Image (cartoon, rainbow, N blue to C red):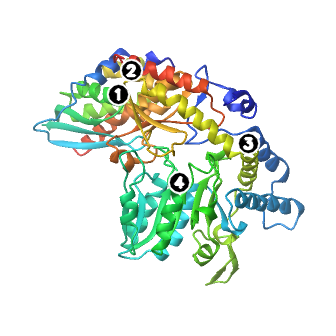
């Protein structure tokens, strides 16, 4: 696996300047997710109204992959219904686990589909899926 | 100083490639590589002597028993235990430490007592004591650090009191790589009637250990961090203390006699070795001890010291590298270097080094409280062994210099 296939410009950009890494005034819920193997922890804040993820943001620490993944995820799910946001999370996690490989199916993930190469790095899978698992858990009760 | 060729022939794995690059193995604090001699001993056992020891009245079983008990004698000699019965085989240091926590701790620690550990402990010498403290109503206290990373003199002076029932410290921190003055701590513990436990996981493969000289009541280590197979570990305990302790795991081979409602325990060491033991692992441990003794610890220490002395100035010359535990005011630095690359998460550092064939550890190294104490979430760790070379250091540092660039940061 070549380094530039993982540390793409997109990941570099999102990890250096994560626009969605901030507090979220008016959040309706927030949930912590953590990666026990490295101790990294993110807090995902969501504003859910009328069954729609109106806005989201995250705080915490993590590697380039987990931070970029969280940032890209929020861009993707903002404005989506709770049900669809969860579907996207499942699809992303499926992609990283190599359970979903069909390109047409992955198109819906937009920029997040560019993280697919992480599925070739078993040591980094947990980093990529941290935010998505947290999102799925947070929306479970909605 | 470190003549790679001499050792490389003994370590088949080190001649391999990782990601298409010559492997630079700098994760010896996690586990060491294995010499051919140890692998042969393991194969010899499983290929020619395998039987359940202590049970069968046939030649193979007798041979397996001999191999297993010889490992106990060799281990006792290796760490200078007074007698072989003081060596209990476990699966690793973690199990050895849990044995002490559950058996000694749960019996001897009571409400209002104190257990004292250092903030630099590995989770394996921390979480079991948290559990004992919670279960018994005792208080878990910590020896914190001086600004140079060494254990606080003041805490050692003040926190070992009449309330202290047990002091459990590591001989060498698995993150900071600093050797603690164990003899002094043990002496202080004994002066107040407390037991002293030493975690030797990071020390026993790198320096000569004499448990009687340390006067430690317990000493725990893993075989796999000292050239041996995974799955064999050791708990040393003073005979009288072990003898008075209740068993930890119960079942076959640890009994004297079993009736429907009652059981009497076997003598030491069998009392603490329930079930079929890791005889192959013990055979490997014997071979590892043979290897280390013929190499000598003077040589191991000289090589590791040379590598650290060679690496540190190169690391300090890189303005974006932050080092931990590298400024000790005492001559007690060992071959472990913890560091961070500014702006870059340790996992990204490790992945990038991996692509250059360099293996290091990234994360909290099972020492989360220490990292929080240092104000870090995680760090990178390079740890040497005698088969590492200056060329390994060069490859590591060359790869480190690429890290920030890969993530789009300036040098």
Q: Residue at 22%, 35% (x, y): give it.
A: A82
Viewer-side label of 2, 4: 4
Label 3: how many Cα within 10 Å (few below 14, some 14–19, many 20+): few
Cβ–Cβ under 8 Å for marks 4 and 3 = no
Q: Which mark is residue B404?
A: 2
Q: Which mark is residue B295?
A: 3
Q: Label 3 lies in what chain?
A: B
Q: Label 1 lies in what chain?
A: B
Q: Residue furthest right?
A: B59
Separation of marks 2 and 1 at Cα, in angstroms: 8 Å
Q: Nearer the viewer, residue B22 or B187?
A: B187
Residue A95 quadrant: top left
Cβ–Cβ under 8 Å for marks 3 and 2 = no
Q: Is residue B367 above or below residue B73?
A: above
How far from the left and from the top, in percent, is residue B304?
60, 37
Numbered disc 4: secondary structure: loop
Q: How many marks?
A: 4
Residue B274 appears in the rendering: no
Q: Nearer the viewer, residue B338 or A31?
A: B338
Cβ–Cβ under 8 Å for marks 2 and 1 = yes
How far from the left and from the top, in percent, is residue A87?
31, 32
Q: Are marks 3 and 2 on the same chain?
A: yes
Label 4: how many Cα within 10 Å (few below 14, some 14–19, many 20+): many
Numbered disc 2: secondary structure: helix
């Amino acid at each position: 696996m070549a380094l530039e296939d993982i540390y793409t410009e997109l990941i570099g950009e999102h990890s250096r300047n994560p626009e969605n890494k901030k507090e979220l005034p008016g959040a309706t819920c927030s949930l912590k997710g953590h990666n026990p193997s490295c101790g990294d922890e993110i807090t995902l804040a969501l504003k859910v109204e009328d069954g729609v993820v109106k806005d989201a943001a995250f705080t915490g620490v993590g590697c380039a992959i987990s931070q970029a993944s969280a940032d890209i995820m929020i861009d993707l799910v903002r404005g989506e219904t709770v049900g669809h946001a969860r579907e996207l999370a499942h699809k992303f996690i499926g992609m990283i686990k190599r359970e979903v490989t069909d390109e047409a199916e992955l198109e819906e993930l937009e920029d997040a589909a560019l993280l697919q190469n992480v599925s070739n790095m078993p040591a980094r899978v947990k980093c990529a899926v941290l935010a998505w698992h947290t999102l799925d858990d947070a929306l479970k009760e909605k | 100083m470190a003549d790679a060729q001499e050792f490389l022939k003994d370590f088949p794995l080190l001649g391999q490639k990782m990601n298409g690059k010559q492997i630079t193995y700098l994760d010896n604090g996690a586990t060491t590589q294995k010499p051919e001699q140890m692998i042969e001993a393991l194969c010899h056992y499983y290929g020619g002597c395998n039987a359940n020891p202590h049970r069968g009245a046939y030649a193979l079983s007798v041979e397996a028993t001999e191999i297993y008990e010889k490992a106990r004698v060799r281990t006792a000699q290796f760490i200078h235990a007074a007698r072989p019965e003081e060596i209990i085989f476990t699966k690793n240091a973690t199990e050895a430490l849990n044995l002490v926590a559950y058996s000694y701790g749960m019996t001897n620690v009571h409400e209002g007592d104190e257990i004292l550990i250092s903030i630099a402990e590995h989770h394996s010498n921390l979480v079991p004591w948290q559990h004992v403290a919670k279960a018994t109503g005792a208080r878990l206290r910590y020896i914190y650090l001086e600004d140079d990373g060494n254990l606080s003199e003041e805490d050692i002076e003040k926190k070992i009191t009449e309330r202290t029932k047990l002091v459990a410290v590591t001989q060498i921190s698995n993150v900071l790589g600093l050797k603690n003055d164990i003899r002094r701590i043990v002496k202080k513990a004994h002066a107040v009637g407390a037991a002293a436990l030493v975690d030797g996981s990071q020390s026993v493969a790198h320096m000569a250990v004499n448990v009687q000289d340390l006067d430690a009541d317990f000493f725990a280590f893993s075989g796999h961090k000292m050239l041996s197979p995974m799955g064999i570990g050791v708990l040393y305990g003073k005979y009288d203390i072990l003898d008075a302790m209740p068993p930890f795991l119960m079942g076959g081979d640890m009994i004297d006699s079993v009736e429907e409602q009652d059981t009497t325990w076997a003598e030491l060491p069998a009392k603490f070795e329930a079930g079929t033991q890791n005889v192959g692992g013990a055979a490997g441990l014997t071979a590892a001890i043979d290897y280390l003794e013929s190499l000598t610890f003077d040589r191991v220490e000289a090589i590791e010291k040379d590598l650290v002395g060679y690496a540190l100035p190169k690391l300090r010359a890189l303005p974006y590298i932050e080092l931990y535990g590298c400024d000790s005011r005492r001559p007690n630095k060992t071959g472990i270097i913890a560091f961070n690359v500014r702006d870059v998460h340790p996992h990204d550092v490790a992945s990038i080094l991996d692509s250059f064939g360099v293996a290091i550890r990234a994360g909290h190294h099972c020492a989360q409280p220490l990292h929080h104490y240092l104000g870090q979430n995680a760090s990178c760790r390079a740890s040497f062994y005698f088969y590492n070379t200056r060329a390994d250091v060069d490859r590591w540092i060359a790869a480190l210099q690429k890290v920030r660039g890969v993530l789009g940061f300036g040098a």
